[in-house]
Amino acid sequence: MTKSNTGMVDPQESAAKELKTYALGFAASVLLTGVAFAAAISDLPAVWKVGIICLAALLQIVAHLRNFLHLSFSGGQSREDLLLVLFSVTLLAIMAGGTWYIMADLGGRMHEKGMMPHEASP
Amino acid sequence: MSDNSLYPGLNLGETHSAAHDQAETTVFGFWVFVMSDLIIFGILFACYASYLDPVGLAGGPGPADLFDITSVAIQTALLLLGGVAYGGVSLVVKYEHGHRRLIAWLLVCAALGAGFLFFEVRDFIEQAGKGGVPQASGWLSSYWTLVGLHGIHVFSGIVWIMAMVAQIAVRGIDDVVKVRLSMLGVFWHFLDLIWVAIFSFVFLVPLS
């Protein structure tokens, strides 16, 4: 990077770099999608399948953010963009995670056998 | 990537300084919309997950009756390729490879998006034929709302791409068009990201 102090980046060089970023993102997405679908149709126990699918989805979302949306996680980004992502993710965790937790808990208490006290002691 | 990204998506860079500076505020504003869209999708995901139990299914048809994993795989491939193809659009704009290539890449994106929609609508029609209509159960209501909303987004994306093709034909690749293409890129890649969550949590997890 001898040219960086002139403030000019060689366009050929940066074009190749950007093309590589897209290619890497594409390769990662294909791989992770393949893993998720392979897990879904495999004979693994259900818990394993769900775990693999969730992990592959999380990794693929990070790959999309980095390689396609070009969000930098290490400060090479306008600060507000990253703050907005973090704020949105926090809101989502509270609202979506909270909804899912409350409804799952309610469902467990009201519908599953053995959970209700009067059923446990007839 | 250049040293400093001013906004989400591939930055135009200093060679396009006027458009690059304009894009900072405009694309940030659009990014705010995208993030509020993310919240809507997140809430719909939470609804879907909450309904995914025997009570939510309400005796109606379930995931194993309705979902066709082959069709989901085809849709995933088409949308993923469509998203990556927009990388071609961004690079052509940034390195000024001309109108023809730009329009070609945009049409590739639109065609792949349309292919995705074709398979999605075909699945919806098939599912409705098997009794999987939105009013059959809470789970199906949340399924149609979530996946349908994503489908409407993809449709709007295609309309937007065609509008950009028309604008490029009429006014050429000026600064306004460059900024709009940057916004469209953020939108198009965001739809890909939402689809990753949909094929994982809506289709694959219930089928496991």
Image (cartoon, rainbow, N blue to C red):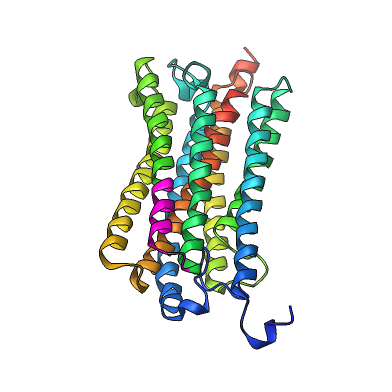
Q: Position of residue B136 (x, y in %)?
A: 36, 21
| Quadrant placement of the C terminus of chain B | top right
Residue B123 point in image, percent of width and height: 41, 25
Residue B134 visible? yes
Q: Magenta span has B105?
A: yes
Whether residue B132 is visible to the viewer of this picture, yes or no, is: no
**Residue drawn at x 42%, y 74% as measured from the top left:** B25
Displayed quadrant of residue B169 = bottom left
Query: Residue at position x 40%, y 20% from top?
Result: B127
Q: Nearer the viewer, residue A79 or B160?
A: B160
Q: Main secondary structure of the magenta part?
A: helix
Q: Nearer the viewer, residue B190 or B39?
A: B190
> What residue is shown at x 57% (from left), y 51% (from top)?
A93
The residue sitting at 63% across, 40% down in the picture is: A30
Name the side, left or right, on which B124 lies relative to B11: left
Magenta span of residues:
B96-109
Q: Quadrant of residue B149?
A: top left
Q: Position of residue B130 (x, y in %)?
A: 39, 14
Of residue B39 and residue B126, the one placed in the foreground of this image is B126
